[in-house]
Image (cartoon, rainbow, N blue to C red):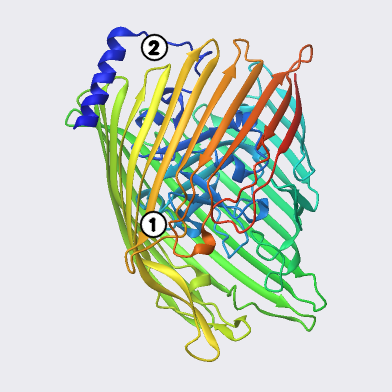
Amino acid sequence: MIVFGGIMMLSTIMKAEVSWAVSMSERADRMKDRVVIIGTKTETTLFDSPQSVGLLTAEDLEKSLAQDLGEALQEIPGVNIDGGPRAIGKTPNIRGLSDSRVQLRLDGARMNFLTGHKGQLFVDVDNIQKIEVLKGGASALYGSDAMGGVINITTKDPGDLLKEGKTLGMKLGVDYNSVNVEHQESLSFFTKPTEKFEFITNYNRWDSAPKIRLGDGTHLNNAEQKGFDSLNKMILHPTESSDVTFTYNKYDENAKVPSNPASTVSNENPLQKRETERQLVKIGIANKAAGEFFEDFGADIYYQTTEITEDRQNAALREDTLGIGTFGFEVKNSNILDVAGLPNILTYGIEYYKDIAEGERNTGTGGADLGSFPNGNFQGGAVFLQDEISFFDDKLTVIPGVRWDYFKSESSLNSKNTDNRVSPKIALVYRIVEELNFFTSYGLGFRAPRLLELYPSGQHFPGNNFQSNSNLKPEKSQNFEAGFRGDWGRFSFETAYFLIKADDFIETIVAFDTFPGTTTSRNVSEVEIWGVENSVDFYIGSGLSTFAGFDIIRGKDITDETPLTSIMPDQLRWGLKYQNEEDTLHASLTGRFVDKQYRTPDSSTHTSGYAVWDIKTQIAIPGLEDAKLSLGIENVFDRAYREHLSSIPAAGRNFVVGLSKSVQW
């Protein structure tokens, strides 16, 4: 009550004594003006979202000078990246949950490839229009794997690049990063010759040296990566209110890295040539016609496949091929209704997806099944329903929702695993005053067992064999969040408290009570994770603003009262940003201050605290229309440090140079 009263007093003082009005040219990133969809599957602003949501637009990504998707996601409070500094091994961590407990989507299509130490972030930053991150449990809308949150990446449309009145354009970009001697080039063509048709093709390639310079002056070897990411998208507009989108996206990368890219080469972690190929084919239909039955209709059908081929670089031939293909579709609609004088937005739909996993090992005498990546399939089907009910002239919005999922896993050599879950939620947003609101949510989440947990077989390592367990139960969670948001134009903030309680956590157990020993997955743990996320943004004036974010997170395994390894250390981000009135110069100074992390069950995972500073700027080149020069220094003071959950040091000082030029007719 004291905190609530203080916030109310602050709001009253600000309204009574200070004029906070700011033109959009000065303050373009207000929460009230940034629209997201991920939190409700309907358009809402960040300010009115019932859960904490992070948002990065193409403009944000361009200014951040991010080399890869992992670096970009690190900009969002509450999101961390495991498995660096090699980009090929990075995976997202949201509020202490990672891997298959975070659902990853590309243009709404599930990216379900996941296996130990292979990474997940196979999307090039240059093809991205926006990234939305829903933090916290979201199974009521998204089903399995959404216990920690959901990341949806939206690729660029031609309309995102074309200026008003232009019908054809092209853009060329080149970038250089000194820390790994990486060269990147991109080329885009985009056109909208008529109101009924638009098209974009975008090609990006990169090539890095076989080593990364570290903060202590030494080098991390075996880090060579080169590849490309191409995006082709055609959009038809049959009517003024409808779109049909055809998308083909291919990502292909070759690397020479250890089997576990987050560690160094050893006998247990041999060097290998690795090729990663991901392809997405998707058809999307959208219709927005106010007052009609299909008021906010969307239907997506897609096939996405990821395949990794690994060739060990030693005397004995051993080539492994691992692949997961996902076929899926989702249909949803929203209607605006008036029920007993109360506005309602009713959202409902269905989702189906099927994963087909195949693994093969070739040792020179023909292919054989790869037991650690078992052949099998997973099928999931669901229906969901949500209502957004407004009371008291939109001061209070109550959002109940529920989803029912049925899922089945099977392998040719093992029995089936079937189950179903009901995932309800309730959320509300209360507008205390026009500039301040309170939000809270409570829901149940779950994660279905993965094929790799249910059906592994064969040798794990000499003296230890995989053992399948087709009786695994789904992980279950309770998710609570509450917080305040304020947006006065010049000043905005968000503070949120969250609590996650989960049981039947699936853990991989390596045992030696028999010979040979066994490696199997079991439902063994009950965990509790809680934390606080805070962010503040203040516009000082004359183009200068400051921002800060502070995260605290704690977690423990209640089964044996030990801390969880996956919990990130306390950290503070602070910075200054400058943007001139003509929007031709952007500059930022950012510091990240990370506390030591000794709250882990194993001392080998302890990390020391550190501070890292970055300086970045983007300049419109005088006399050359639509040309930009980007310059940056990351880790300015060449600090030697190690990120939590990485066994190797982070990259050292990095000089970034980029140049882009756009031409439109």
Circle 2 Cα neighbour tier, 10 Å, few/some/many (<14 / 14–19 / ≥20): some
> At 72% across and 69% down in the image, what residue appears?
270
Tag on residue 391?
Answer: none
Question: Which badge, 2 or 1, is on the more N-terminal residue?
Answer: 2
Q: Quadrant of the C terminus?
A: top right
Q: Quadrant of the N terminus?
A: top left
**Outermost residue, left direction?**
340
Tag on residue 20?
Answer: 2
Asked if disc 2 and disc 1 are in contact, CB closer than 8 Å, the reply is no
Tell me if residue 400 can be seen: no
Residue 656 in the image: state x and y as whole percent.
73, 34
- Height in image: 401 above or below 18? below
- Per the image, label 1 sits on a secondary structure element best described as strand
- Image check: 491 left or right of 118? left
> At 42% across and 58% down in the image, what residue appears?
144
**In which image quadrant can residue 129 be found?**
top right
Residue 490 in the image: state x and y as whole percent.
43, 16
- Image check: 36 left or right of 188? left
- Height in image: 47 above or below 520? above
Q: Which residue is mark 1?
A: 382
Residue 539 in the image: state x and y as whole percent.
47, 17
- Height in image: 190 above or below 256? above
- Height in image: 144 above or below 181? below
Front residue of this view, candidates 408 and 287: 408
Circle 1 Cα neighbour tier, 10 Å, few/some/many (<14 / 14–19 / ≥20): many
Q: Amino acid at mark 1?
A: Ala
- Per the image, label 2 sits on a secondary structure element best described as loop
Residue 283 in the image: state x and y as whole percent.
58, 46
